[in-house]
Image (tube, rainbow, N blue to C red):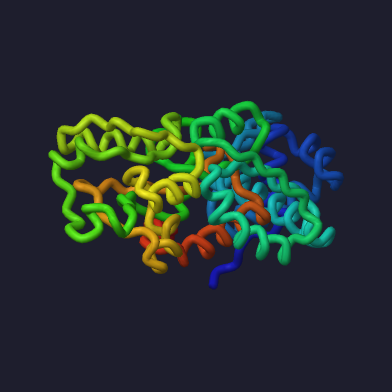
Amino acid sequence: MPDLPDLRQVRSLVALAETGSFTKAAEQLGVTQSAISHSIRALETLMDCELVERSGKRIALSQNGTTLLRRFKAALTELNKAREELSLLRRWGQGRLRVGVTQTLCSYLLPGAIQEFRQLYPRCEIHIESADTASLIELIDQGTIDLAIGIGGREPAWIKFEPIFDDNLIFVVSPDHDWAKSKKPTPTNLEEQSFLVYARKSETYHLLKSTFAEVGIRLRPSLSLGDMGAIKEMAKVGAGVGVVAPWIAQTEIENGELIPVPLATTHHRSWGLLSRESRHLNMIEEDFLRLCRKTTAEFEGTTPPKLKKATK
C-alpha cells in the first residue's frame, strides 16, 4: 500500500489554502513557518507533483493542490465527527434524540426499538412527538425535532428520506362479512361498503384515495378514525370494512377475529426516517435507525427497503 499523507501535512495544506500565507498558516496551527514549509515539501514529494504555486509573496494552490484540498477538507470533517462521537461514548450514552413518529408507529414500532436503544444509551435524553407525516415535517422545519419516521413519497425537496420498510394496505372484515369467504371485492360491491379508514389528513388516506380512483371508485368512508386500534375493533363487530396494513392486524388475523382481503389494486407505502437534506446522522441517530429497521423486519407483510449501495 502506498504511503498516505500524515495529519500534519493535511492540516498544513488546508491552513495554507485558508490563509494564503506560510506565516499565517503557522500562526493558525501554532507551529513554526519552517514546519509548514517542510510539511508542504514532504507532501509534494509524496504526491510527486507541485501543490503550491509561488510568485513572489503570492501563494496559491496549483490545480493538483486544489484537487487534494477538497479531499483533505472532507477527511478533516470526518475526523472531527469521529472525535465528537468518541467524546459522546466517553460520557457513555449522554446525548439527545429528538424524533417524531406517527401515532401508529408509536404503538407498534417504538416499544421494541426504544427498549434496545435504552440498553445502548441509558443516559440519552429522548424527546418524542406524535403526529401525521405532514405535521412531523413541519416540526422538523420549526426545529422542534431533528428526525421523523413517516411515509415517504410526497416530502418536500429539502427533506432527506432514509428507507426503513415497505408495506401494502389490505381490507380486514369480520368472519361474518360476505367478503370473508369470497375475498373478491368487485367495483360494484366496493361502492356498497362502509369503510373504516385512517385520518383524512394522513398520507395513508391520500394513498387510499388514489388506490380507489384507479378502479374508478370515489372513496366514501363511513368512519374516519385517528387510531388503528379503533378501526380493528369496529371491523370486528361488523361496523364496516377496515383498511389497514397486515402488520397492524397480525394478531387479530392469526386469531381469526379478522379476515384479510386484498385491495382491488395494490399500492405500496414506503416508511422511513425523515430529516433535513443537509443534516448528517450522528452515531446515536444511526443506531436508532438501525434498531427501527431491525424491529420492523419482524412485521407481517413488510419488505426491507432497497438501500443504495455504497460506491467504491
Q: Quadrant of the N terminus?
A: bottom right
Q: Is residue 311 visible?
A: no
Give 59 or 193, whichever is nearer the viewer: 193
Residue depicted at 58% across the width and 49% down the height: 106
Q: How many marks?
A: 0
**Up-down relation of residue 311 to residue 151 (above or below):** below
Q: Quadrant of the C terminus?
A: bottom left
Q: Is residue 233 left or right of residue 113?
A: left
Residue depicted at 55% across the width and 56% down the height: 109
Residue that lies at the very extreme toward the bottom in this rendered image: 1
Q: Position of residue 11 (x, y in %)?
A: 71, 48
Residue depicted at 53% across the width and 51% down the height: 49
Q: Is residue 145 left or right of residue 21?
A: left
Residue depicted at 69% across the width and 32% down the height: 20
Give 115 or 152, whichever is nearer the viewer: 115
Give 54 or 296, whichever is nearer the viewer: 296
Give 204 or 179, whichever is nearer the viewer: 179
Residue 85's quadrant in the figure?
bottom right
Q: Position of residue 266 (x, y in %)?
A: 24, 48
